[in-house]
Every structure is written in structure tokens, then in C-alpha cells.
């Protein structure tokens, strides 16, 4: 059984008013996919720390990471555990090979829609 960790690093401007939807963006790889990594010999925390370090400028200790979903498809030997972290706009800086992608420029896979909808409002 393989375990894949996906981290939804969400940059949010926050609510300005009830009439304005906040602008949000996600940290993605060069293909526009959410950042992820398989757990090998390290713990979940170490794997999330490595994933954060390789993709952006944030110190993992300053990021509040929470689990929001777990996906296992019948017949698959892989389980995907989805974590999220919200950061204020202007703090996140992507490293080479990664980008900050506005939500309206993304084609989000259906399996992630439920996970994103489960995240408390930014």
C-alpha cells in the first residue's frame, strides 16, 4: 500500500466584505497539479516538511497544516491523504518548478473539489 500526501497550499486575500468573493490561489507544480509526495521511510510530518521546503519559501513550523480528506479508490493500492494550509496573500513565494496559480486559471480534478469544499471559508 502506497500513501500519497497532497498539500493544498492556499494563498487567500481574505474576506473584504460579504459581497466580494476572496481571491485565492494554490501552489502548484509546473503542470498545474497540486503538490504531492509519497511517504517512504519518513513520517507524515517529515514528508510534509520536505514537500513544503522543496516547493516554496515557507518555514514548515510557521504553517498550520490540517488534514481535510482521504481518498482510496476501490481496487487501488494507493491512498491519498489531502492536507491544506491557508496563508495570507503576499507571503507565499514559489521555488523553481512551482507556481502560484489563481483558482480561476485551474482545472481542478473532481476528486479535489470535495476536499476544497470541506475547507473552512477563507
Image (spheres, grey):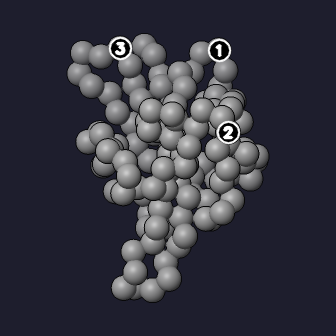
Q: Nearer the viewer, mark 3 or mark 2?
A: 2
Q: Name the quarter where the N terminus is drawn.
A: top left
User: Residue at image x 56%, y 58%?
Assistant: 11
Task: Say left or right for 116 vs 23.
Answer: left
**Is residue 93 among the parts visible in the rendering?**
yes
Residue under numbered circle 2: 95
Residue under numbered circle 3: 77
Q: Nearer the viewer, mark 1 or mark 2?
A: 2
Image quadrant of residue 44?
top right
Q: Residues within 10 Å of mark 2 (few under 14, many from 20)?
A: some
Task: Say left or right for 112 vs 74.
Answer: right
Above or below for 3 versus 92: above
Task: Say left or right for 64 vs 28.
Answer: right
- The number of numbered badges drawn on the structure is 3
Outermost residue to the left: 74
Between residues 55 and 70, which one lies in front from this camera angle? 55
Task: Say left or right for 90 vs 102.
Answer: right
User: Residue at image x 39%, y 36%?
Assistant: 70
User: Residue at image x 61%, y 65%?
Assistant: 89
User: Residue at image x 34%, y 33%?
Assistant: 71
Q: Secondary structure at mark 1?
A: loop
Pointer 3 or 2: first along the chain: 3
Q: Secondary structure at mark 3?
A: loop
Q: Where in the figure is residue 115, as x and y percent of width and height?
A: 37, 48
Amino acid at each position: 500500500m502506497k500513501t500519497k500526501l497532497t498539500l493544498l497550499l492556499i494563498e487567500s486575500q481574505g474576506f473584504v466584505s460579504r459581497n466580494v468573493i476572496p481571491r485565492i490561489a494554490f501552489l502548484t507544480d509546473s503542470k498545474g497539479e497540486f503538490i504531492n509526495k509519497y511517504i517512504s521511510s519518513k513520517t507524515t510530518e517529515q514528508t510534509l516538511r520536505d514537500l513544503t521546503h522543496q516547493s516554496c519559501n515557507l518555514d514548515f513550523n510557521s504553517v498550520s497544516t490540517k488534514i481535510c480528506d482521504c481518498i482510496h479508490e476501490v481496487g487501488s493500492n494507493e491512498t491519498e491523504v489531502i492536507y491544506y494550509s491557508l496563508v495570507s496573500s503576499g507571503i507565499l513565494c514559489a521555488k523553481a518548478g512551482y507556481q502560484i496559480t489563481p483558482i480561476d486559471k485551474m482545472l481542478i480534478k473532481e476528486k479535489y473539489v470535495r476536499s476544497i469544499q470541506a475547507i473552512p471559508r477563507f
